[in-house]
Amino acid sequence: MRLPNGYGSVTKLPGKRRKPYLARVTLGWITDEHAGKTVQNRVPIGTFKTKKEALQALAEYGANPYDVQSNNLTLADLYKKWTETYFPTLESDSSARTITSAWKYCHAIYGMRVKDLRARHIKGVMENGYVISERGKNAGEKIMATAGTKARIKSLFNLMLDYALEYELVDKNYARTFDLANDIIKEKEAATRGHINFTPDEMRMLWDNVDTFRFVDWILIQCYMGWRPQELARLRIKDVNLDSQYITGGMKSNAGKERVVPIHPRIKNLIQRNYDMAMELGSAYLFNDPDAVKGGMTITYDKYAGRFAKTMTALGMRDEHRPHDPRTTFITMAKKAGVDEYVIKRLVGHKITDVTEGIYTKRDVEWLRAELEKMP
């Protein structure tokens, strides 16, 4: 049956193919300068298993024409579009490197059309993605995605497909239709060694050197407020209420976001001097390093981790300490001091499962402060 003029065409491709029927539509005319003539601009909308499916695709296009160029957009094209918009919003090169590193494991689906992507394809690259090592004794070998990398791949697709959904390049974000598998979470947890609290002697050493070594004050503030490292790094000047002596901040979960943490009297002066420095520098953030060589003076998790490690080395402390250890030290000190269990959960942003306490009980900052100051 001959199709109407301008309707499009279906052609069977040569050879043995899984989808041998090519459907194309005409989008205007183009001039072939070499041949000296004008020809139809025939753009493919896809290949199909049967002629019936190809004709159906043409019919759907005719009933509701769409941007064929976007329809044929590959994941590599989408990644380029998204990162050109997203990377300039990041405040550090390390955040961009995290994304580009995870993307390298997804090469198997670079050429796939965005509209064809489903959850199983994302899970596939998470499970089977790899890169080829380019250096060291393992050069040339496959490096499979670790649990941490799998989690970053999932996060990458969450964000990239959010962008695609916003610009109507897809109808659904399939990355957000599933959670990380329990085995990935367990693998990630197994790869992460436990936290080690600062001992009383190590706490004394920190206090003895608070004015000797840079960044010791950041560690002590974390020990007395319980912030996650990335939360500490992103605290803004506007989050600090010096009159009422508390800071509002947090991230990660609903329980952790925008939580109020009183400033313990022991670290009041440390908060003040970081606040004063930020004001002098004209920074919007509480913690800054004006001597930073790369990435500006504001702090990211990677920057904090690097400065934390240097401080531990300078003080000759155990190599095992990590940037989350001050947070667990805070929780341990609070429990030893008899601080109310619900106060501890509120201060560190842990979920409160008790309905009466979590929903119906309203706690003011003075109640939180009274409990917090039980800590010596």
Image: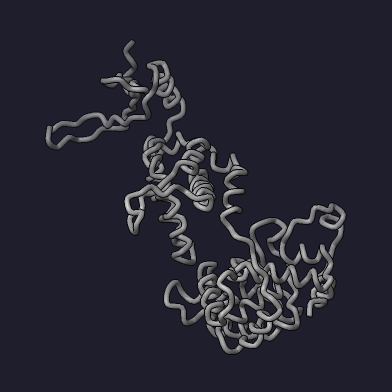
- Where residue 168 appears, x then y in whole percent? 49, 41
The part of the image, by quadrant, that contains residue 266 is: bottom right
Q: Is residue 15 left or right of residue 7?
A: left
Vertical placement of residue 108 versus 223, above or below: above
Vertical placement of residue 251 versus 291, above or below: above
- Where residue 369 appears, x then y in whole percent? 81, 74
Residue shown at 50% from the left, 45% from the top: 161
- Where residue 6 appears, x then y in whole percent? 33, 23
User: 295 and 318: which one is in front?
Assistant: 318
Residue 158 in view, yes or no = yes
Vertical placement of residue 60 versus 153, above or below: above
Vertical placement of residue 63 versus 52, above or below: below
Residue shown at 67% from the left, 70% from the top: 197
Quarter holding the N terminus? top left
The part of the image, by quadrant, that contains residue 66 is: top left
- Where residue 150 appears, x then y in whole percent? 51, 48
